[in-house]
Amino acid sequence: MLDLQQVYNTLFDYYGPQYWWPADSNDEIIIGAILTQNTNWKNVELAINNLKNENSCSLEDIKKISDDLLSELIKPSGFYNIKCKRLKDTASALCDLNGVEFPDRDLRNFILSIKGIGPETADSILLYAYKKPFFVIDAYTKRLLNRLDNQLNYHTYQDYQNFIMSHLEKDCQLFNEFHALIVVNAKNACRVKPKCNICPLVKLCNFGCDYESINSKS
DNA sequence: GGCCAGGCGGCCC
DNA sequence: GGGCCGCATGGC
């Protein structure tokens, strides 16, 4: 039986705290969450630096600047026309909230109702900017879970999220750190082409590649 | 020079 | 509900 708390403890002991999300403000987290959709984080950094150089890295700034300038500044992150619209729509919707408090579920549904904000982007915003305990499911998380337990047969985003959230304390700091550690480990070891010989989770994982045989070859 | 990245919505069936 | 497509740049 997969013990998620043990998985977390192992990752934390190995990599240490990750201090996520990498950003200077909550608005920058929200902007980064949209810009990183299907995009390498390095490219997002180039776009965010452009916004900062124009003093335009807040939601109020995003509302004010022209579509043409915004598209130009975020160009390095790719999909810049569609992301320009998504940033504008999101800035407008979230600024309108103006500090009004909702139950967490209602806030999530509101954010999800913004066109261009799907479940992963919404949960990234909720967890890292609004400090609400929703676990972020991304491609890395799905890959890790499927490898850790090859009996899992989950398909939808909600399948994965329900599984994780029903097996852990609903704690923002835990969700924050765990997701960050999953990403770091996915880039380091649990890649598309896995490097199980350097993975701290290898003894907890029933992925098809055999740890002993990999070790003996290296 | 090809492949891919921390998704999403619009289609189609 | 699932599968495919367009959206685009820069790093490797």
Image (cartoon, coloured by chain):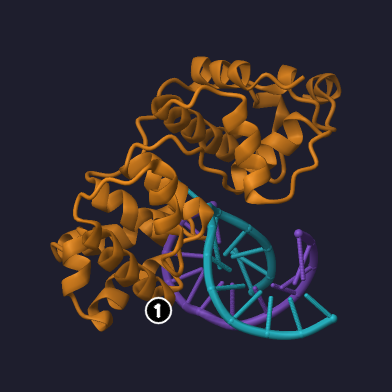
Chain colours: A orange, B cyan, C purple
Residue A98: image location, x then y, percent:
19, 55
Residue A60: image location, x then y, percent:
17, 63
Camera-nearest residue between C1 and A81: C1
Residue A178: image location, x then y, percent:
50, 29
Residue at x-position 67% and y-position 36%:
A144
Is B6 above or below relative to A186?
Answer: below
In the picture, measured across the screen, residue A53 lies left or right of residue A172, that is: left
In the picture, measured across the screen, residue A196 lies left or right of residue A54, that is: right
Residue B11: image location, x then y, percent:
68, 85
Does the image show residue A83? yes
User: Pointer 1: residues within 10 angstroms few (<14), some, or many (20+)?
Assistant: some
Residue at x-position 68% and y-position 43%:
A159
Residue that numbered label 1 is attached to: A81
What quarter of the picture does the C terminus of chain A occupy? top right
Camera-nearest residue between A79 and A42: A79
- Residue A104 falls in which quadrant of the image? top left
All told, the count of numbered labels is: 1
In the picture, measured across the screen, residue A131 lies left or right of residue C1, that is: left
Helix, strand or loop at disc 1? helix
What quarter of the picture does the N terminus of chain A occupy? top right
